[in-house]
Image (tube, grey):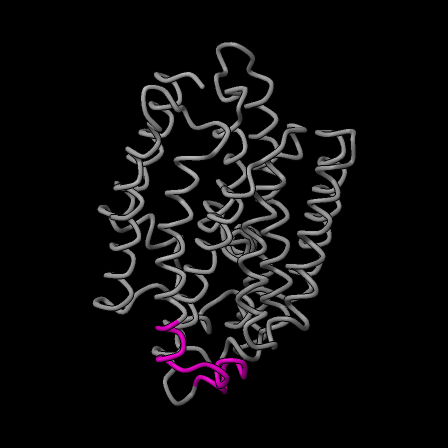
Amino acid sequence: MSHFSTTAAQAANPPNMFAELLRAMRPRQWVKNVFVFAALAFSEERLWQFWNDPWPLLKTIGAFVIFCMAASGIYLVNDLVDIEKDRAHPKKRNRPFASGRLSPMVGVIASVVLFLVALPMAFLLDRSFNFLIVIGLYIFIQGFLYSYWLKHVVLLDILILAAGFVLRAIGGAAVLNILITPWLLLCMLLLALFLGIGKRRHELMLLDAHAGEHRRILEEYSLPMLDQMMSIVTASIIMAYSVTAFLAPAAPQEPYPMLMATIPFVIYAIFRYLYLIYIRNEGGSPDELLLKDIPLAGSVLLWGISVLTVLLLFPN
Protein backbone atom coordinates (compact mmCIF):
# COMPACT_ATOMS: atom_id res chain seq x y z
CA MET A 1 0.00 0.00 0.00
CA SER A 2 2.84 2.38 0.87
CA HIS A 3 4.58 1.57 -2.43
CA PHE A 4 1.34 2.37 -4.26
CA SER A 5 1.04 5.65 -2.37
CA THR A 6 4.63 6.60 -3.23
CA THR A 7 4.08 5.81 -6.90
CA ALA A 8 0.85 7.80 -6.92
CA ALA A 9 2.58 10.75 -5.25
CA GLN A 10 5.36 10.69 -7.84
CA ALA A 11 2.84 10.53 -10.66
CA ALA A 12 1.00 13.52 -9.21
CA ASN A 13 4.22 15.53 -9.07
CA PRO A 14 5.46 15.99 -12.67
CA PRO A 15 8.44 18.20 -11.76
CA ASN A 16 10.01 15.23 -9.95
CA MET A 17 9.58 13.06 -13.03
CA PHE A 18 11.14 15.67 -15.29
CA ALA A 19 14.00 16.19 -12.85
CA GLU A 20 14.72 12.45 -12.81
CA LEU A 21 14.45 12.29 -16.60
CA LEU A 22 16.95 15.13 -16.93
CA ARG A 23 19.27 13.31 -14.54
CA ALA A 24 18.96 10.12 -16.61
CA MET A 25 19.88 12.13 -19.71
CA ARG A 26 23.22 12.90 -17.98
CA PRO A 27 23.72 16.56 -18.91
CA ARG A 28 27.11 16.52 -17.16
CA GLN A 29 28.40 14.18 -19.84
CA TRP A 30 27.51 16.61 -22.60
CA VAL A 31 31.01 17.98 -22.07
CA LYS A 32 32.24 15.02 -24.13
CA ASN A 33 30.62 16.59 -27.18
CA VAL A 34 33.18 19.42 -27.26
CA PHE A 35 35.08 17.08 -29.60
CA VAL A 36 32.69 18.43 -32.24
CA PHE A 37 34.62 21.72 -32.14
CA ALA A 38 37.96 20.09 -33.03
CA ALA A 39 37.55 20.43 -36.79
CA LEU A 40 36.51 24.07 -36.41
CA ALA A 41 39.46 24.91 -34.15
CA PHE A 42 42.05 23.24 -36.38
CA SER A 43 40.57 24.20 -39.76
CA GLU A 44 43.10 25.57 -42.24
CA GLU A 45 40.70 28.40 -43.09
CA ARG A 46 40.57 29.53 -39.42
CA LEU A 47 36.78 29.13 -39.50
CA TRP A 48 36.57 29.73 -35.75
CA GLN A 49 37.20 33.43 -36.36
CA PHE A 50 33.54 34.30 -35.97
CA TRP A 51 34.16 38.03 -36.48
CA ASN A 52 34.86 37.26 -40.14
CA ASP A 53 31.96 34.84 -40.64
CA PRO A 54 29.82 33.64 -37.70
CA TRP A 55 28.07 30.89 -39.68
CA PRO A 56 30.69 28.10 -39.21
CA LEU A 57 30.69 28.64 -35.43
CA LEU A 58 26.89 28.70 -35.30
CA LYS A 59 26.69 25.48 -37.33
CA THR A 60 29.19 23.80 -35.01
CA ILE A 61 27.21 24.91 -31.97
CA GLY A 62 24.12 23.42 -33.63
CA ALA A 63 26.03 20.18 -34.19
CA PHE A 64 27.04 20.20 -30.51
CA VAL A 65 23.38 20.53 -29.46
CA ILE A 66 22.32 17.70 -31.78
CA PHE A 67 25.05 15.43 -30.42
CA CYS A 68 23.89 16.25 -26.88
CA MET A 69 20.36 15.19 -27.80
CA ALA A 70 21.55 11.99 -29.47
CA ALA A 71 23.89 11.19 -26.58
CA SER A 72 21.09 11.65 -24.03
CA GLY A 73 18.87 9.30 -26.02
CA ILE A 74 21.70 6.76 -26.06
CA TYR A 75 22.23 7.09 -22.29
CA LEU A 76 18.53 6.39 -21.75
CA VAL A 77 18.69 3.28 -23.96
CA ASN A 78 21.82 2.06 -22.20
CA ASP A 79 20.31 2.53 -18.73
CA LEU A 80 17.11 0.77 -19.77
CA VAL A 81 19.09 -2.22 -21.02
CA ASP A 82 21.22 -2.32 -17.84
CA ILE A 83 18.55 -1.77 -15.17
CA GLU A 84 19.16 -5.08 -13.38
CA LYS A 85 22.95 -4.90 -13.68
CA ASP A 86 23.02 -1.33 -12.40
CA ARG A 87 21.20 -2.46 -9.26
CA ALA A 88 24.27 -4.57 -8.41
CA HIS A 89 26.57 -1.54 -8.70
CA PRO A 90 27.27 0.52 -5.53
CA LYS A 91 26.87 3.83 -7.40
CA LYS A 92 24.79 3.06 -10.48
CA ARG A 93 22.00 1.55 -8.39
CA ASN A 94 21.05 5.15 -7.54
CA ARG A 95 20.32 5.96 -11.17
CA PRO A 96 16.68 6.94 -11.88
CA PHE A 97 15.68 3.69 -13.63
CA ALA A 98 17.62 1.28 -11.40
CA SER A 99 16.29 2.94 -8.23
CA GLY A 100 12.70 2.86 -9.48
CA ARG A 101 12.25 6.63 -9.31
CA LEU A 102 11.64 6.84 -13.06
CA SER A 103 9.38 4.59 -15.11
CA PRO A 104 11.09 2.70 -17.97
CA MET A 105 8.23 3.70 -20.27
CA VAL A 106 9.12 7.37 -19.75
CA GLY A 107 12.68 6.54 -20.79
CA VAL A 108 11.54 4.71 -23.92
CA ILE A 109 9.32 7.60 -25.03
CA ALA A 110 11.98 10.21 -24.24
CA SER A 111 14.72 8.36 -26.16
CA VAL A 112 12.49 7.95 -29.22
CA VAL A 113 11.58 11.65 -29.14
CA LEU A 114 15.22 12.68 -28.81
CA PHE A 115 16.24 10.54 -31.79
CA LEU A 116 13.30 11.70 -33.92
CA VAL A 117 14.18 15.33 -33.24
CA ALA A 118 17.97 14.99 -33.61
CA LEU A 119 17.91 13.29 -37.02
CA PRO A 120 15.77 15.88 -38.88
CA MET A 121 17.73 18.67 -37.22
CA ALA A 122 20.95 17.10 -38.50
CA PHE A 123 19.56 17.17 -42.04
CA LEU A 124 18.38 20.79 -41.73
CA LEU A 125 21.82 21.81 -40.52
CA ASP A 126 23.61 20.09 -43.42
CA ARG A 127 21.56 19.34 -46.54
CA SER A 128 24.39 17.30 -48.05
CA PHE A 129 23.46 14.34 -45.78
CA ASN A 130 27.05 14.06 -44.48
CA PHE A 131 26.25 15.19 -40.95
CA LEU A 132 23.00 13.20 -40.93
CA ILE A 133 24.95 10.04 -41.83
CA VAL A 134 27.41 10.65 -38.98
CA ILE A 135 24.60 11.20 -36.45
CA GLY A 136 22.80 8.10 -37.74
CA LEU A 137 25.95 6.00 -37.36
CA TYR A 138 26.57 7.43 -33.90
CA ILE A 139 23.06 6.51 -32.72
CA PHE A 140 23.14 3.07 -34.35
CA ILE A 141 26.63 2.08 -33.14
CA GLN A 142 26.58 3.62 -29.67
CA GLY A 143 22.89 3.31 -28.90
CA PHE A 144 22.09 -0.12 -30.23
CA LEU A 145 25.12 -2.15 -31.34
CA TYR A 146 27.02 -1.20 -28.19
CA SER A 147 24.11 -1.30 -25.72
CA TYR A 148 22.81 -4.69 -26.86
CA TRP A 149 25.92 -6.51 -28.08
CA LEU A 150 29.36 -4.91 -28.35
CA LYS A 151 29.60 -3.91 -24.67
CA HIS A 152 29.84 -7.65 -23.97
CA VAL A 153 32.77 -8.25 -26.35
CA VAL A 154 36.19 -7.93 -24.75
CA LEU A 155 38.37 -5.07 -26.10
CA LEU A 156 35.67 -4.08 -28.61
CA ASP A 157 33.71 -2.56 -25.73
CA ILE A 158 36.51 -0.04 -25.15
CA LEU A 159 37.20 0.51 -28.86
CA ILE A 160 33.55 1.24 -29.64
CA LEU A 161 33.35 3.78 -26.83
CA ALA A 162 36.46 5.44 -28.27
CA ALA A 163 34.90 5.41 -31.75
CA GLY A 164 32.10 7.58 -30.38
CA PHE A 165 34.58 10.40 -29.74
CA VAL A 166 36.02 10.06 -33.24
CA LEU A 167 32.51 10.25 -34.71
CA ARG A 168 31.97 13.49 -32.80
CA ALA A 169 35.08 14.97 -34.39
CA ILE A 170 34.08 13.70 -37.85
CA GLY A 171 30.62 15.17 -37.30
CA GLY A 172 32.14 18.57 -36.59
CA ALA A 173 34.02 18.38 -39.90
CA ALA A 174 31.03 17.00 -41.82
CA VAL A 175 28.70 19.81 -40.78
CA LEU A 176 31.23 22.31 -42.14
CA ASN A 177 32.07 20.21 -45.23
CA ILE A 178 35.80 20.36 -44.50
CA LEU A 179 38.53 17.75 -44.09
CA ILE A 180 40.06 16.88 -40.73
CA THR A 181 43.68 15.79 -40.45
CA PRO A 182 44.09 12.05 -39.74
CA TRP A 183 46.63 12.89 -37.03
CA LEU A 184 43.99 14.82 -35.12
CA LEU A 185 41.56 11.92 -35.42
CA LEU A 186 44.28 9.59 -34.12
CA CYS A 187 44.84 11.88 -31.12
CA MET A 188 41.15 11.79 -30.30
CA LEU A 189 40.97 8.02 -30.69
CA LEU A 190 43.92 7.54 -28.35
CA LEU A 191 42.54 10.03 -25.82
CA ALA A 192 39.18 8.23 -25.85
CA LEU A 193 40.94 4.90 -25.34
CA PHE A 194 42.87 6.44 -22.45
CA LEU A 195 39.62 7.55 -20.78
CA GLY A 196 37.87 4.24 -21.53
CA ILE A 197 40.67 2.12 -20.08
CA GLY A 198 40.73 4.32 -16.98
CA LYS A 199 36.99 3.86 -16.58
CA ARG A 200 37.24 0.06 -16.88
CA ARG A 201 40.09 0.03 -14.36
CA HIS A 202 38.06 2.06 -11.90
CA GLU A 203 35.07 -0.29 -12.27
CA LEU A 204 37.29 -3.32 -11.74
CA MET A 205 38.78 -1.86 -8.57
CA LEU A 206 35.46 -0.56 -7.23
CA LEU A 207 33.57 -3.82 -7.68
CA ASP A 208 36.51 -6.13 -6.91
CA ALA A 209 35.27 -9.74 -6.66
CA HIS A 210 31.72 -8.76 -7.63
CA ALA A 211 32.73 -7.16 -10.95
CA GLY A 212 31.29 -10.03 -12.98
CA GLU A 213 27.91 -9.67 -11.29
CA HIS A 214 27.56 -6.12 -12.52
CA ARG A 215 29.10 -6.56 -15.96
CA ARG A 216 30.32 -9.94 -17.12
CA ILE A 217 32.81 -8.41 -19.54
CA LEU A 218 34.84 -7.17 -16.54
CA GLU A 219 35.80 -10.78 -15.86
CA GLU A 220 37.81 -10.67 -19.09
CA TYR A 221 40.05 -7.89 -17.77
CA SER A 222 42.68 -7.70 -15.05
CA LEU A 223 44.46 -4.76 -13.46
CA PRO A 224 47.89 -5.71 -14.88
CA MET A 225 46.39 -5.98 -18.37
CA LEU A 226 44.63 -2.61 -18.12
CA ASP A 227 47.76 -0.99 -16.66
CA GLN A 228 49.80 -2.26 -19.60
CA MET A 229 47.22 -0.94 -22.06
CA MET A 230 47.21 2.39 -20.21
CA SER A 231 51.00 2.68 -20.53
CA ILE A 232 50.89 2.03 -24.26
CA VAL A 233 48.08 4.50 -24.90
CA THR A 234 49.63 7.20 -22.67
CA ALA A 235 52.89 7.20 -24.60
CA SER A 236 51.01 7.06 -27.91
CA ILE A 237 48.87 10.10 -27.05
CA ILE A 238 51.87 12.28 -26.30
CA MET A 239 53.68 11.16 -29.46
CA ALA A 240 50.61 11.54 -31.69
CA TYR A 241 49.79 15.00 -30.37
CA SER A 242 53.41 16.09 -30.75
CA VAL A 243 53.39 14.97 -34.39
CA THR A 244 50.07 16.76 -34.90
CA ALA A 245 51.48 19.96 -33.39
CA PHE A 246 54.38 19.82 -35.84
CA LEU A 247 52.75 18.52 -39.01
CA ALA A 248 49.02 19.34 -38.95
CA PRO A 249 48.04 21.45 -42.01
CA ALA A 250 46.61 24.13 -39.72
CA ALA A 251 49.76 24.32 -37.59
CA PRO A 252 51.78 27.52 -38.11
CA GLN A 253 55.29 26.72 -39.33
CA GLU A 254 56.86 30.19 -39.19
CA PRO A 255 59.06 31.14 -37.46
CA TYR A 256 58.81 27.71 -35.82
CA PRO A 257 56.11 25.01 -35.47
CA MET A 258 54.44 27.16 -32.83
CA LEU A 259 51.84 24.62 -31.70
CA MET A 260 54.65 22.77 -29.98
CA ALA A 261 54.21 25.34 -27.20
CA THR A 262 50.92 23.62 -26.31
CA ILE A 263 52.51 20.20 -25.74
CA PRO A 264 53.36 20.79 -22.03
CA PHE A 265 49.68 21.39 -21.24
CA VAL A 266 48.79 18.04 -22.81
CA ILE A 267 51.52 16.23 -20.90
CA TYR A 268 50.45 17.78 -17.60
CA ALA A 269 46.78 16.93 -18.18
CA ILE A 270 47.67 13.31 -18.98
CA PHE A 271 49.91 13.00 -15.93
CA ARG A 272 47.29 14.66 -13.70
CA TYR A 273 44.68 12.19 -14.87
CA LEU A 274 47.03 9.29 -14.18
CA TYR A 275 47.57 10.70 -10.69
CA LEU A 276 43.80 10.79 -10.12
CA ILE A 277 43.47 7.20 -11.36
CA TYR A 278 46.37 5.57 -9.53
CA ILE A 279 46.69 7.65 -6.37
CA ARG A 280 43.13 8.80 -5.70
CA ASN A 281 41.45 5.75 -7.27
CA GLU A 282 39.18 7.88 -9.45
CA GLY A 283 38.52 7.78 -13.18
CA GLY A 284 35.06 6.20 -13.26
CA SER A 285 33.50 9.39 -14.63
CA PRO A 286 35.97 11.45 -16.70
CA ASP A 287 33.40 14.21 -17.19
CA GLU A 288 32.95 14.62 -13.43
CA LEU A 289 36.71 14.68 -12.87
CA LEU A 290 37.08 17.42 -15.46
CA LEU A 291 34.42 19.49 -13.72
CA LYS A 292 35.60 19.02 -10.14
CA ASP A 293 39.40 18.71 -10.33
CA ILE A 294 40.70 22.25 -10.66
CA PRO A 295 44.28 21.39 -11.82
CA LEU A 296 42.93 19.08 -14.54
CA ALA A 297 40.26 21.54 -15.67
CA GLY A 298 42.80 24.38 -15.57
CA SER A 299 45.30 22.52 -17.73
CA VAL A 300 42.65 21.70 -20.33
CA LEU A 301 41.44 25.31 -20.33
CA LEU A 302 44.96 26.66 -20.69
CA TRP A 303 45.61 24.22 -23.53
CA GLY A 304 42.54 25.48 -25.39
CA ILE A 305 43.49 29.12 -24.85
CA SER A 306 47.07 28.48 -25.94
CA VAL A 307 45.97 26.69 -29.13
CA LEU A 308 43.64 29.52 -30.15
CA THR A 309 46.29 32.13 -29.26
CA VAL A 310 48.93 30.44 -31.41
CA LEU A 311 46.53 30.05 -34.32
CA LEU A 312 45.47 33.68 -34.02
CA LEU A 313 48.94 35.24 -33.68
CA PHE A 314 50.74 33.02 -36.18
CA PRO A 315 48.85 32.68 -39.47
CA ASN A 316 49.39 29.52 -41.46
Residue drawn at point x = 28 percent, y = 50 percent: 292
Residue drawn at point x = 30 percent, y = 53 percent: 270
Magenta highlight range: 211-228
Determine whether 175 is above or below 93 in the image: above
Q: Is residue 313 left or right of residue 173?
A: left
> Does 22 lie within the magenta span?
no
Find residue 211 and report its horizontal and vertical position in percent.
Answer: 44, 84
Q: Is residue 1 left or right of residue 108?
A: left
Find residue 98 and report its horizontal and vertical position in percent.
Answer: 53, 72
Considering depth in this image, is 137 or 82 the residue closer to the camera?
137
Considering depth in this image, is 309 or 100 the residue closer to the camera?
309
> Does 224 lie within the magenta span?
yes
Residue that sits furthest to the bottom in the current view: 209
Find residue 109 and report its horizontal and vertical position in percent.
Answer: 71, 56
Considering depth in this image, is 20 or 64 the residue closer to the camera?
64
Q: How many numbered discs?
A: 0
Q: Report the predominant secondary structure element of the magenta stretch.
A: helix
Considering depth in this image, is 315 or 18 the residue closer to the camera?
315
Determine whether 33 is above or below 72 in the image: above
Find residue 220 and report its horizontal and vertical position in percent.
Answer: 50, 84
Kindly tell me whether residue 310 is visible in this rendering. yes
Quadrant assignment for the N terminus: bottom right
Kindly tell me whether residue 13 is visible in this rendering. no
Residue drawn at point x = 32 percent, y = 19 percent: 255
